[in-house]
Image: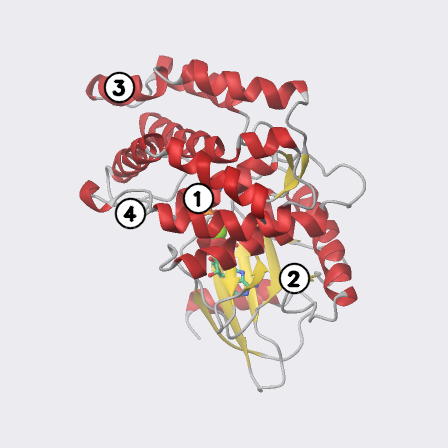
């Protein structure tokens, strides 16, 4: 084993695992945490997913893990009632040897461990309307299973999809311009400012309660879902952001990633657009499950939520670029600016197709 593996091996030794560690390697394409695959010796022992949690972003890991324990316990009970496999259809948190769902090392880093769910597939975008339908059904089912969970979750990320809060952050970062990047960005800043009123208008409906608050995932991009070999959603993962918010965040963020014909950080804007057939597939799958709880006000804003979340993502990438790249992992100097432009191109494509999107939502809600 390499030096890093030895160190990681020492971390894992603090968790209640079954079997002996064979190999540890970096895993996945997440933008926030460091993720590792932990292989154990012997085919009867489970493998694991180890994560070094990003404490720059997550300030309350015990609170986060307590939310995740509650959500996974609730989902597992639903899966069991339906005769499914709770270790494949829900995340399983492995406790540390001191009996808590995380381990804090001597440097103050927080680590978590989950059972690895084998024989799955992950994607960066949906290739077919059928795949999008499966994804929509998966997110709708995730929300439906949690729709009767009692008690509030701890708000470990205050203001996460709260655009009023994002504008406060934005105003401060733009004012400070800490690394002097603002002077080149007047067009990009105008993309944000010209839509500010519209976005606040929507958010006021959430603040007034006209659009209700429920248990939501808040990071439903397609690579946070494990599909089985048949292409059905097996398990919704990356539960770090489970919070009480509007389900529209989950629908909107999924549309932002599923329907994109290019990459989230595509330097070639001609590849980026919103695919209507994928939108239709996802919407139909989502509504088939979510009709059990959606209110009229939620249905009315489903299509708009894709615009809202994509706009928010443009703002977040641009804000991080102006701030000097402190939030998202970047692999080259202008990465956050490239992401900003690609997401803005997607936003324009969504805006151009809004009438057709609303028509599909209306039809799906009345016929399914
Ligand atoms: P991040 O918060 O950095 O996005 P994720 O929790 O999404 O981290 O994990 C990164 C990747 O690791 C996922 O996209 C997925 O491919 C894989 N992964 C995470 N948890 C599991 C699991 N329990 N079983 C199998 N694969 C997983
Ligand atoms: C982050 O953790 P990951 O890579 O699944 C981010 C999301 C963004 C996304 C953009 C906690 O998601 O909000 O939409 O990157 N997660 C957090 O790809 O900020
Ligand atoms: Mg992720």
Chain-order first, disc 2 or disc 3: 2
| Residue extending furthest toward the front | 367
Q: CA distance from mark 3 to mark 1?
A: 30 Å
Q: Are marks 2 and 3 in contact (CB under 8 Å)?
A: no
- Asked whether residue 335 is in view, the answer is yes
Which percent across, then down, holds residue 199?
46, 20
Instruction: Tell me which residue sits at (60%, 79%) in the image.
Output: 20
127 left or right of 224 in image = left
Could you tell which of marks 1 and 2 lies nearer the N-terminus? 2
Name which quarter of the figure residue 101 lies in: bottom right
Residue mark closest to the camera, 1 vs 2: 1
Provide the residue designation for mark 2: 90
From mark 4 to mark 2, how far is it between C-alphas? 32 Å
- Count of numbered labels shown in the rendering: 4
What separation in Å lies between label 3 and label 4 (alpha carbons)? Answer: 21 Å
Q: Which residue is mark 3?
A: 182
Dot placed on the residue nearer the N-terminal end, 3 or 4: 3
Asked if the residue at label 3 sits under 8 Å from ligand 2, the reply is no
Circle 4 residue:
331
* Lower sequence index among marks 4 and 2: 2
- Which x, y percent locates residue 89? 64, 65
The crowding category of the residue bearing disc 2, from other C-alpha atoms within 10 Å (few below 14, some 14 to 19, many at least 20), is many
Of tags 3 and 1, which is closer to the observer? 1
* Few, some or many residues within 10 Å of mark 4 (<14, 14–19, 20+): few
Mark 2, mark 3: which one is toward the viewer? 2
Q: Secondary structure at mark 3?
A: helix
Query: Residue tagged by mark 1?
Result: 255
Indicate left or right for 320 with 98 as reference.
Answer: left
């Amino acid at each position: 084993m390499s030096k890093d593996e030895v160190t990681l091996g020492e971390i894992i030794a603090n968790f209640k695992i079954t079997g002996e560690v064979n190999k540890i390697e970096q895993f996945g394409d997440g933008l926030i945490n460091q993720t590792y695959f932990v292989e154990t010796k012997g085919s009867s022992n489970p493998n694991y997913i180890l994560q070094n949690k990003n404490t720059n972003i997550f300030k309350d890991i015990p609170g986060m893990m307590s939310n995740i324990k509650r959500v996974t316990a609730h989902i597992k009970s639903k899966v069991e009632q339906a005769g499914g496999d709770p270790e494949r259809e829900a995340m399983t948190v492995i406790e540390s040897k001191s009996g808590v769902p995380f381990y804090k090392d001597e440097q103050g880093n927080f680590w978590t461990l989950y059972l690895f769910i084998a024989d799955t597939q992950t994607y960066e975008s949906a290739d077919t309307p059928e795949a999008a339908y499966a994804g929509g059904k998966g997110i709708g089912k995730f929300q439906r299973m949690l729709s009767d969970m009692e008690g509030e979750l701890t708000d470990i990320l205050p203001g996460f999809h709260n655009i009023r809060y994002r504008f406060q952050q934005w105003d401060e970062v733009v004012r400070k311009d800490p690394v002097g990047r603002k002077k080149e960005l007047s067009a990009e800043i105008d993309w944000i400012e010209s839509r500010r009123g519209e976005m606040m208008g929507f958010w006021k409906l959430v603040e007034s309660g006209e659009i209700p608050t429920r248990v939501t995932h808040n990071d439903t991009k397609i690579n946070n879902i494990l599909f089985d070999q048949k292409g059905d959603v097996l398990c919704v993962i990356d539960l770090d952001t489970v919070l009480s918010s509007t389900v529209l965040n989950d629908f909107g963020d999924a549309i932002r990633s599923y329907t994109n014909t290019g990459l989230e950080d595509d330097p070639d804007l001609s590849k980026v657009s919103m695919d209507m057939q994928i939108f239709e597939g996802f919407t139909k799958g989502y509504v088939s499950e979510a009709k059990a709880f959606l209110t009229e006000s939620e249905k009315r804003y489903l299509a708009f939520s894709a615009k809202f979340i994509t706009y928010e993502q443009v703002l977040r990438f641009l804000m991080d670029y102006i701030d000097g790249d402190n939030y998202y992992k970047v692999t080259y100097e202008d990465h956050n600016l490239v992401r900003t432009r690609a997401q803005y191109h997607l936003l324009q494509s969504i805006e151009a197709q809004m009438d057709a999107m609303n028509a599909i939502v209306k039809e799906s809600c009345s016929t399914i």
